[in-house]
Image (cartoon, rainbow, N blue to C red):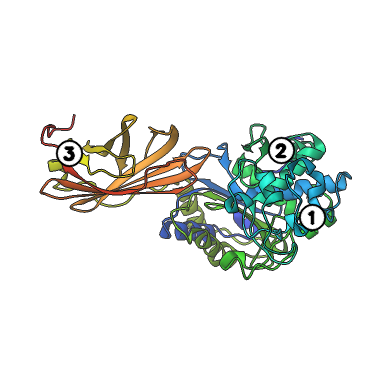
Amino acid sequence: MSSQEHFPLSTFPPEHMGISSGSILRFLEKLDESRLCMHSFVLVRHGAIACEGYWAPYTAESLQRMYSVTKSFVGVAIGLLAYDGYVRLDDPVITYFPDKVIKQPHPYTEQMTIRDLLRMSTVHTRTATQIVPHPDLLKAFFNVTPSHRPGTVFNYDTGASVVLSALVERCTRMPLLEYLRMKALSKMGFSDNAYCQKIGSVSHGGSGLLCTAHDLAKFALLCMQQGNWYGFQLVPKDYMRLATSKQIDTHFAQPGHGAFGYGYQFWRTDHNGFCMFGMGGQLAICLPQENLVLVTTADVMDNPGGVDLIFQAFWDTIYKELQDDSIPEDAEDAACLYEKLAALRVRHVEGNTDSPIARQVGGRRFRMDDNPSIYKELSVGFGPNYGTLEYVTETGSHEIRFGFGHNEHQIFPEPSLECLASGAWTDEETLFIRVYVIDQNLGSLQLQLHFTEDGTVTLSSRTYGDSLLTGMDACVTGYLDPTMGEDFE
C-alpha cells in the first residue's frame, strides 16, 4: 500500500468528522492573538486528516526537529525491544553497559531498571552531564553519585532517554530510527529522509529526531490506536496501553500542562489524553476517547508560556466545540478558513516601518564600548521596505537583512543557518529586529537598537532556544563614528 492509502487525506470537510470550520478558524485566531511563531498543524480524526496548515515557508514536506518528542519514539522502541526478547523492563539497566562503569557503582545505580528510565524515575534530579560535565553522557549517567533511590520520584532526565536509545542500538546493532523503520515506521509511509541526530556515537534519543508534521501525526495515530495501524498490530497492544497511561505522578516537578502524570516517555494530559511534547511547541496531543489527534510544530521558545497557550487555544476551540457525529457545513466559515490557511506565514514583527531618526542614523557607523559580546561596530541602513543591520566582530563584517511588514528569508551570516528576519520601529528612537532560525536547530535572536539625537546607540541583544547563536547576548552602548558617511548605499 502507498502511504496515502495507509493514512488517507480526507476528501471531506472537517464537519464530516464533527469538527466545525469555525472552531478551527477560532483556534488559529487564538494562536495569532498570542503572537506565537507557529510552523504547522495537522488535525486527525477517525484515522484521516480533517485539516492541516503550514506557515510559509514551511510546507508538508519540511523536516523539522522534534526535540523531546523523540523520547516517545524511544519509548516505543523499548517496547519492541522487550517484545523481541532482547530485554525485560525490570532488568537493571547497568548490566547492559559494563564498559561505561568506571568505578564501583552506587547501590542505587545498580538497582535502577529499564522501567525506571522509561518513566523518568532515575537516581538523578536532572541529566547527569548537567551535574558533572563529562564528554560521555553514558559514563556520566552510571558514575555520577545518585541523589536518591530509583523509582521513587519523577525528575525529567534527558540522559535517561539517551541511555535507552543506546540500549536499543546495543541490542539490535542498528541505529534507533532504522530499528523503528524495520518494525513499524516503514509500514506507515514514514519519510525516507527523516533522520536522528547523534550525541557522540549514539542516536540522540532525547532530542534528535527530524521528520515532517505528517510523520509525527502518523506516529501519534499509531500510539493512540495502541500500536495498531489500520488492522496491523505493529507494536504490542499491552505495552502501548501501559506506555501511554500514567506510570508516575508529576505534580511536584511539572506544574501546568505537565501535571497530569507520565507514562513510558509519554506525558499524560487533561481530558484523559496523552501527549508527546518537544521544546518550542512540537506537540502531538492524543485524545483516544474522542479519536482525535492534534500535531503542532512551532518555535515559541521566546515565550515561556507559549506551549500552554497552544494547549489552551485547542481546549477552548476545537475540543470544546467537537461533536460526536457529522455536522452541517457553514459555507461562510469554510470559506474564511480556506482563506486563512492559504495566507499562513511565519509571523513578522509588527509596528511602524519608518521613523524620522532613521534618516539621521542610516548608513552611519557606531563603535561599541568594550564589552564581552561579539559586537565591536554596527550600522543600520534602510531601503524602501527593508533594512540591513551590519555588525563587525573579530571574524569580520556580517549583515542581516530584515523586512518591514514581512520576513526576509536568508542565511544567517555566522554561524551559517537558514533564517527569517523582520523589524519595526516601536517608537521614534527604537528599532526592534527579530531573527527566527528555521534550520535543523530552532531558535531566535531579538535585537533592540535605541538611537539618540546626540549620536549614540544602545544595543540590547538576546538569544532563545537551541540555535547555536553563541556570544550574541549583549547590552552595550556605541558612539557615532564621525569619519563614516551618512548615506546608505
Q: Position of residue 251 (x, y in %)?
A: 63, 70
Q: Position of residue 234 (x, y in %)?
A: 81, 45
Q: Is residue 461 left or right of residue 468?
A: left
Residue displayed at 75% across by 49% down = 76
Please give the label number shown on residue 110.
1
| Circle 1 crowding by C-alpha within 10 Å: few under 14, some 14–19, many from 20 | some
Q: Is residue 7 visible?
A: yes
Relative vertical location of residue 81 with respect to residue 111 in this rendering, above or below: above
Residue displayed at 79% across by 50% down = 93
Residue toward you, 374 or 345: 374
User: Which of the image's four quarters has the C terminus?
Assistant: top left
> In the rendered structure, which disc, 3 or 1, sits on the residue that comes first in sequence?
1
Q: CA distance from mark 3 to mark 1?
A: 65 Å
Residue displayed at 59% across by 50% down = 132
Q: Residue under circle 2? A: 177
Residue, far right = 85
| Circle 2 crowding by C-alpha within 10 Å: few under 14, some 14–19, many from 20 | many
Please give the label number shown on residue 362.
3
Q: Is residue 52 left or right of residue 248?
A: left
Which residue type does callout 1 highlight? Glu
Quarter residue 199 falls in? top right
Q: CA distance from mark 2 to mark 1?
A: 28 Å
Which residue type does callout 3 highlight? Gly
Residue, far front = 104
Is label 3 or label 1 in front? 1
Which residue type does callout 2 highlight? Leu
Q: Position of residue 179 (x, y in %)?
A: 77, 37
| Label 1: which secondary element | helix
Please give the label number shown on residue 359.
none
| Label 3: which secondary element | loop
